[in-house]
Image (cartoon, rainbow, N blue to C red):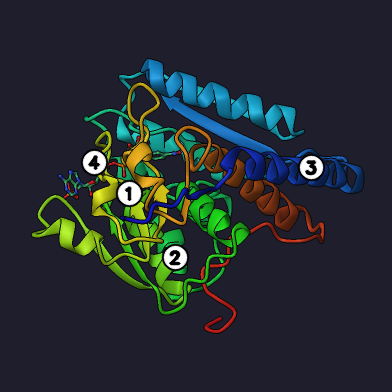
Amino acid sequence: MAQTRTARLMDGTGLARRIIETSSASAADILRHTGTAPCLATVLVGDDPASVTYVRMKRARCEKAGIQSRHVALPASISTSGLIETITELSEDPGVHGILLQHPVGPHIDERAAFEAIAPEKDVDGVTMHSFAAMSFGLPGFVSCTPGGIMRLLEEYEVDLAGKHAVVVGRSAILGKPAGMLLLGRNATVTYCHSRTSNLSAIVRQADILLAAVGRPRFITGADLKPGAVVIDAGYNPGNVGDVDFESAKDRASLITPVPGGVGPMTIAVLLAQTIDAARRRLGVPGGSPRVSPTSPATA
Ligand code: NAP
């Protein structure tokens, strides 16, 4: 008879709440020491309903945690140079500690050029080339928030990554690619899969740690998994459905993130933690760094 197991759930909601509580206490500490509240500037181009909702959620979370939010709403018709000018002003403004440019920004805008106008010390969303390079070299810096949240979850559940085969399905600049780099920094052996990968199922079946970041509902099923695998589902598809078929995967995995309540809540938590870190550094307030280390102690 085939042996089945039920995986332990990785509770992103609870961990995110604890990180936000810590950020909130830190925001109060910074205000007490300096008379200045940490401040995150959000920049929104146009009025795409999903982007409007995401920015509103991020601002509400910030304000609840004692992080001031400064919002800049720009018309969809803004040019690349107009957007760069706005972001440069925020980069130079000493009252702003972190900058978030909500993307996508529209096809007529050079998104990369706009991201690069964010000062590295304010890149709390981890979107600049500077941040990506620092992370890849194992140097301190801000990490892309969703991969940073995934690493926090793995740490929380004491998943030993050294020497383990981590398979990352998806290679986007904000998710799959940086997540793979962070896993490599913790000494996992990393394989990236993408839309041109041959024999994807056979590779996924080798994964000790599987990260699904594809954007396709229930793309990975339990039958694809190595028994005992740690399964991180970053997918968020319409109807609250992940990229992993949770029902079949939970009987095969040892640990698994639910959707919703797994990776999703961690993204905002890391954004807040990194904003606090940026404010502490700018204002010279010492305190525990909530940064996600890009490397394991063994390689740092
Ligand atoms: P994306 O930019 O569309 O990238 C999707 C990746 O999946 C690409 O690298 C693509 O390969 C790969 N892919 C697509 N079809 C594939 C297939 N049939 N076989 C293998 N690989 C395939 O998406 P993303 O922004 O990384 O997001 C991925 C998922 O994560 C989405 O569900 C998104 O909603 C979710 N997400 C969640 C959060 C959060 O806060 N929880 C944040 C960001 C994203 P190619 O590179 O070859 O095209």
In this rendering, which labeled residue sits more in front, label 4 or label 3? 4
Q: Position of residue 132 (x, y in %)?
A: 41, 61
Residue at screen point 39% across, 52% down: 4
Residue at screen point 33% across, 29% down: 237
Indicate yes or no: mark 4 CB to ligand 1 under 8 Å. Answer: yes
Q: Nearer the viewer, residue 145 or 117?
A: 145
Amino acid identity at mark 1: Ala
In this rendering, which labeled residue sits more in front, label 1 or label 3? 1
The residues bearing labels 4 and 2 have C-alpha atoms spaced at a distance of: 23 Å
Q: Are marks 4 and 3 in contact (CB under 8 Å)?
A: no
- The residue labelled by disc 3 is 27
- The residue labelled by disc 2 is 182
**In the rendered image, which quarter contains the C terminus?**
bottom right
- The residue labelled by disc 1 is 212
Q: Of marks 3 and 2, which one's residue comes earlier in the chain? A: 3
In this rendering, which labeled residue sits more in front, label 3 or label 2? 2
In this rendering, which labeled residue sits more in front, label 4 or label 2? 4
- Classify 10 Å Cα crowding around label 4: few (below 14), some (14-19), many (20 and above): some
Q: Is residue 200 visible?
A: yes
Mark 4 falls on what kind of element? loop
The residues bearing labels 1 and 3 have C-alpha atoms spaced at a distance of: 33 Å
Q: Of marks 1 and 4, which one's residue comes earlier in the chain? A: 1
Name above or below for residue 275 compared with residue 142.
above
